[in-house]
Image (cartoon, rainbow, N blue to C red):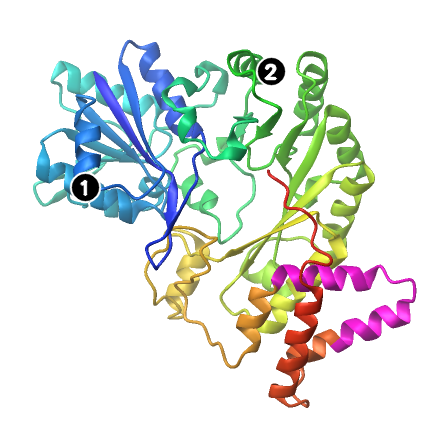
Amino acid sequence: MKVTFVYPDFFQYADGTFMPEGRIYLGVAYLSAVLKREGHETSLVHIVEPPDREWLVERIMDESPDLVGFSSTTHMFRHVAKWAGWLRECGDVATVCGGVHATIAPEEVARTTGIDIACRGEAEETLLELCEALESGRDHTRIAGLWMLRGEELVANPVRPLVTDLDSLPFPDRTIFDPALFCADQHPRGTLMASRGCPFNCTYCSNHAQKSAYPNPECYVRFRSPESVVAEIEQMVAADRGIEFIRFDDDILTTDRGWFSRLSGLYRERVGMPFICNSRVNFTDRRMADALAGMGCSVVCMGIESGNPWLRDKVLGRHMGNDRIVEAFAACHEAGMKTVSTNMFGLPFEDTSMVLDTIKLNALCHPDTIQVSTFIPYPGTELFKTCEENGLLEGGRVDSIFEGRSPLKQDEGGWEPAAVRSNFHTLAYTYGWLDTLRSRTASRLASRALDGLVLSTRLPSVARRRVFEAVTRWSAGRFQPEWIKY
């Protein structure tokens, strides 16, 4: 069989402009490796800008595929649905769509014109079985993990169990990617995953929705052997001499201390390159920070998401205190590593004072880079259900959490909400600078004055706005460090 994967790797703004991404996507790379190991042929149409209809159809059909495999997130599915429709109008090649969106919204995918099959769950074994069935002409409608229409009837096969032995999978096939399509910061980066899954059930994240699809959800978090991880890195670096650092794309690299200790020893001995990873404040004490730094970690990315304790605990399901968050960032800095914080605004039940809480908690953490995104409710998640039950959904899907648009009803109520969001970074670093003042009294008074510009109900709005704009103009650029490529 010849399988051509189509992967969208850009996001488009409301005005039609777009931002190319251009990165290696390991999900497709694993699928390609599994298929090639069994004798099938693969190719990739890596789309880094909105394509012209004629070009896209011709580009796909030039590959002479027996099967076209789309991979899609929820953000990108509107594009994939359109492209599948174009392809169906111009040809009769079989199509399948997998990825996160097919796992958490399989019926929507299966009912989309131009998509013959939705592949729910991790797809290595499922796609291989599908290819073998299509090649031999056998019935594929009963294959575990596949959803499809039979006339008007929806065929919804159960998801097959998670693969528990990740070492049984071949290393991802990076050869299907054209480096000429990569963004600039992808070239020095060697990206891989040492594990799969996340042990937490944050209400906004698709992880718990994906986990619930499997018959063995207790196996959702799995680790490769440290030997396999290091061997992949060695292979990757040997194939690409331009790699300068390693990027572990795991949800949380530091979940299992015993496993991490074994990986650390092998990594120091056989790799010795700087690396970047995701951790979580629950797992990042001084001991872990020292272990990360000793292994060669240069940047740690950790989620704050909201600085308001009630919102973080009761709405987002992130059970951690402000003190623990501050301590985790401090431990990383003391160990000599840079940090990135991830944050959201536009959350259900959030008001401007809660956004300010997030800004001020970032100020106490002093992250080297602050990433800010807009909350997007994903189908199948607990927070999506909450938004539905409270009548908060009103907008369509957007391409990226970084686009700034929200599908939730927003009660703007004056200039303050938009002004605080647009000045998130400036305010965070300004509060952070105030926190470093030698005089604690001066620091507290200045912070309260800055609070009052946003939250005061006693001072005239017009006057507050003028002073706020003057302060943010003065602050912009003074305290913001260089953006870390992570």
Residue at (26% x, 13% y) in the render: 40
Task: Check the image and report above or below for 324 versus 69.
Answer: below
Asked if residue 161 is among those painted magenta in the image, a careful observer would answer no
Helix, strand or loop at label 2? It is: helix
Q: Which mark is residue 230?
A: 2
Task: Check the image and report above or below for 316 versus 240.
Answer: below
Tell me where residue 329 appears, x and y as whole percent.
Answer: 74, 46
Dividing the picture into quarters, in which one does residue 56 lie? top left
Tell me where residue 400 appears, x and y as whole percent.
Answer: 42, 51
Helix, strand or loop at label 1? It is: helix
Res. 142 visible in picture? no
Tell me where residue 50 appears, x and y as whole percent.
Answer: 30, 44
Between marks 2 and 1 in the image, the one whose residue lies nearer the viewer: 1
Tell me where residue 371 appears, x and y as whole percent.
Answer: 59, 51
What amino acid does circle 1 point to?
Arg
The residue identified by callout 1 is 53
Quarter containing the N terminus: top left
Residue at (21% x, 22% y) in the render: 63
Residue at (72% x, 40% y) in the render: 338
Asked if residue 428 is among those painted magenta in the image, a careful observer would answer yes
What are the residue bounds of the magenta stretch? 424-449
C-alpha span from label 2 to label 1: 42 Å
